[in-house]
Amino acid sequence: MFSRHTGRRGRLFGAAALTMAAGLVLAGCAGGETETPGDNGAAPAPDNGGDSNFSITFLPKNLGNPYFDTSNAGGAEAIAEFGGSFQEVGPTEASPTSQVSFIQTAAQQGVDALVVSANDPAAICDALDEARSVDVKVVTFDSDTNAECRDLFINQAEAEGIARVQVEMIADQIGGEGQIAILSAAANATNQNAWIELMQEELAANWPDIELVDVVYGDDDDQTSFDRTAALLQTYPELKGIVSPTTVGIAAAARYIQTSQFQGQVAVTGLGTPNQMREYVEDGTVGAFALWNPADLGYLAAYAAKALVEGTITGAEGDTFDAGRLGSYTVGANGTVLLGDPFVFNADNIADFNF
């Protein structure tokens, strides 16, 4: 799963990330189905001559999630640039089948493309196959389906790199020894499970003095993740660190540690966004965490969808397409496009980022 990214490489968190703040008006989603118009005629026409008039629907794992608020805002930015129509729909809870009805509705509406972060690799495949049978292009991002169910997968970074950086961060923060636990999202989340398996391999190969005592699931829900953190600390009194490869989980774990007797005693790291993690880094609750730029991930996914709808690419290995301000990308094996490498945030650099 490799693809070369050529052109202006927009190294994850450049100035482009800062352009997304205005896009966060897309959030505001609490109820069941939500649609957020993008370029629906109210906004000025793009200056770059974009006149694609494609309808592209973003379907995240769940609404009200800061990570997906940011990634979907990136998609809206790209779609506005090339003159398409943007919608955001989705469930309020990230359960395996909760996305099915939204896929079916989008296909019935005749959208040109769906951009989906899958809650389960197989549970939505039948619905996606039905959509593709009526010529809806399907791009997955962040969390993939089975490869045969989509046209392209926009991968935030290579799974090995994501796993390795999280292990290295926790190892550094606990001095390379002691008990750790993993606080994941949903038990069926494709990306989470791939990273956890690789983290286990990395620990076994290179960190023999670190013991992974448990993997628990917060279902990408703040309160559930908070409660799972409390339970871990009660169950494992010798626990020295928690790794949470989910933006909801890491913030909930940090919030629990911040106001408990464990602050300064139990390390928390994983994947988060600068704005949600800033206070925990600044007060020393969290020493470091990592992520890619979710705004760029959504932006890239939108341009990939455009290229598929236009017929510029088919999703075959070696296809190339333009991704606006991010430059040119090449499709790798298994219809995968790679955004870039993870970036580590800490007290020295977190003030430079705002998303």
Image (cartoon, rainbow, N blue to C red):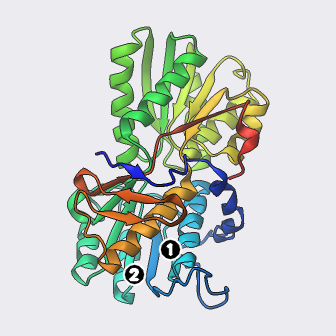
Q: Which residue is mark 1?
A: 89
Q: How many numbered discs, if any?
A: 2
Nearest the eye: 338 or 93: 338
Give the crowd class for mark 1: few <14, some 14-19, many >=20 residues within 10 Å: many
Query: At x 71% / y 46%, what residue is drawn?
Result: 353
Asked if disc 1 and disc 2 are in contact, CB closer than 8 Å, the reply is: yes
Residue 304 visible: yes
**For residue 307, which quarter of the picture?**
bottom left
- The CA span between labels 1 and 2 is 9 Å
Give the crowd class for mark 2: few <14, some 14-19, many >=20 residues within 10 Å: many
The extreme front residue here reads 7
Residue 34 visible: no
Mark 2: secondary structure: helix
Counting from the top left corner in percent of width and height, residue 322 is at 42, 66
Nearest the eye: 44 or 284: 44
The extreme bottom residue here reads 41
**For residue 288, which quarter of the picture?**
top right
* Quadrant the N terminus occupies: top left
Counting from the top left corner in percent of width and height, residue 264 is at 72, 19
Query: At x 55% / y 27%, what residue is drawn?
Result: 242
Counting from the top left corner in percent of width and height, residue 115 is at 41, 68
Q: Which residue is mark 2?
A: 106
Q: Amino acid at mark 1?
A: Val
Q: Is residue 20 above or below residue 226?
A: below
Q: Is residue 88 above or below residue 83?
A: above
Mark 1: secondary structure: loop
Q: Is residue 287 left or right of residue 306?
A: right
Query: At x 59% / y 88%, what residue is drawn?
Result: 40
Counting from the top left corner in percent of width and height, residue 296 is at 54, 57
Nearest the eye: 213 or 234: 213
Q: Amino acid at mark 2?
A: Ala
